[in-house]
Amino acid sequence: MKGRHIILQIVLLIGCTSFVYGQSNSYSYDVIKRIEKVENSLMNWVQTPDSLLRWNIEDRMKSHMVNGVSIAVIHNFKIEWAKGYGFADIAEKRKVTPQTLFQAASISKSLSAIGALKLVQDKKTDLDADINTYLRSWKFPYDSVSNSKRITLRNLLNHSAGLSVSGFPGYFVTDSIPTIIKILDGKHPSKTPAVRSVLEPGIRYQYSGGGICITQVLMTDITNQPFEEYMQQSTLIPLGMNASFFAQPPPSEKKELLATAYNRDGSEVNGKYCIYPELAAGGLWTTPTDIAKYIIETQLSLLGKSSKVLTPEMTKIRLTPFDGYSALGVYIHHNGRYFEFSGGNSGFISKYWADMENGNGVVVMTNSTNVEIIPEIVNSVASTYYWKDFYKPVIKNIISISDPILNSYVGDYLFGETKISVIKKNKRLFIVEDQPYELYFTTENDFFISEFEGDYRFLKDANGKTIGILDLNHDITGNRIVKE
């Protein structure tokens, strides 16, 4: 038996080099077992006593129509493993590897915040001074909305500046690409309106990618360097993020490493990806491994054990939220125990989570617009690695419903202007908007959907006829569409 156990370990170790694309090293037996557990324990907000609602990653990629996924897991302040799944490009049959580059989208804001705070740390700018003190190539046009209050770099980084333009649609490779100044002023060929005040600065959170574009100009004006060059030298290289870059469009020599972007229906984005001249807000190309390096440095710096870019004192400032939630390029959760950020560009969705004390974390990047698989992977990692006070699923009992009752629920329902359909397949019900989601019943009328936190109820009239669906969490009713 001992000999068989040794052979099993050898087989697993050899096999690891084949299924972890691009990895030259083998993982230990214990790490391989944790990888397998993560891969086979994808979970949502709800669970059953018998753990029925657990899935493997390949099945969930198919059901969510996700072509490619890349994961890096941090344990004890080190990258324990990184692995790619599916395809970086279906037509070219290029598989995702740990070296595949994805658009980080808004996760770019976490790194650009570090670059901005490095300038504060070096006393080249002030975190709480009027941004117009340092802007030279463009000035913010204050008006009466700001109520004579000045916008600061701190306001921009924690989204308390009260500015417009939350995000950006991207530009096809055939489009004319505007300068960052034209984007800020909403001038042709910008696809977004001017970045202007909509609230008085400093009163509350108002997410604004437009505000982060202002930091891009500010950093360029202060350093007299193109933003992408400054970020490469001041932040990415010192963090060891050697695969990453802010260049848009990406360098031609990186072509074989780029993930192709895919729409929600699985179709390829025109030109394979969009271009984002809003570099600080969403222009980073990177890998989960590189993002993990940034996370580990943040964790170590916070504990006073490293200062590759920011000092521990500046890292503490960076991770201090003004409203209990929004800090400087990062969000704080679970009573200050975890930090995270997510990103979504056309055809790309990404997310990272990390704790403040124990050196744990995960980075998930996909070349899809479908976000549903990401929390499932994160929950699996958190459960496998026993993250403290993170994943606490709601436990529900699922019951079987007779065919006649299931049939009575089939039909179309209207929530405002949105029509959804309830269909039956293999004696199971699914809600379909742009893709199907299975219904799980807890009573004859009550159900939940694993991908969306909350509970729902089929409504019936006095005669027992189904007339609508009630969203119990938001008290919103979708009325059944009666066909003539």
Image: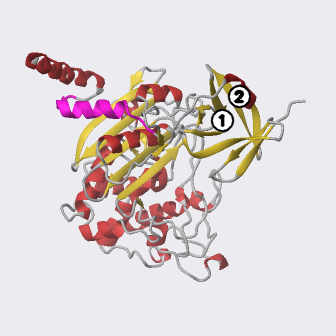
Instruction: Label 2, secondary structure: give it.
Output: helix
Q: Magenta span has 29?
A: yes
Specify the amino acid type for callout 1. Answer: Glu
Q: Which amino acid does label 2 sit on?
A: Ile
Q: Left or right of 148: which side holds 48?
A: left
Labelled pair 2, 1 in contact (Cβ < 8 Å):
yes
Q: In this view, does 336 lie above or below 389?
A: below
Residue 5 position within the rendered picture, expressed as x and y whole percent measured from the top left: 13, 20
Q: Give the range drawn in magenta.
A: 24-43
Q: Provide the secondary structure element on which disc 1 rests.
A: loop
Image quarter of the C terminus: top right
Q: Residue 474: percent from the left, percent from the top? A: 66, 53
Q: Percent x, y for residue 422?
A: 70, 31
Q: Mark 1 points at which residue?
A: 444
Q: Distance between the residues labelled 2 and 1?
A: 8 Å
Q: Residue furthest left?
A: 3
Check the image and report above or below for 34 versus 456: above
Tell me if mark 1 has few (under 14), some (14-19) or many (20+) residues whose alpha carbon lies within 10 angstroms of its own.
some
Find residue 445 and report its horizontal and vertical position in percent.
67, 38
Mark 2, residue position: 405
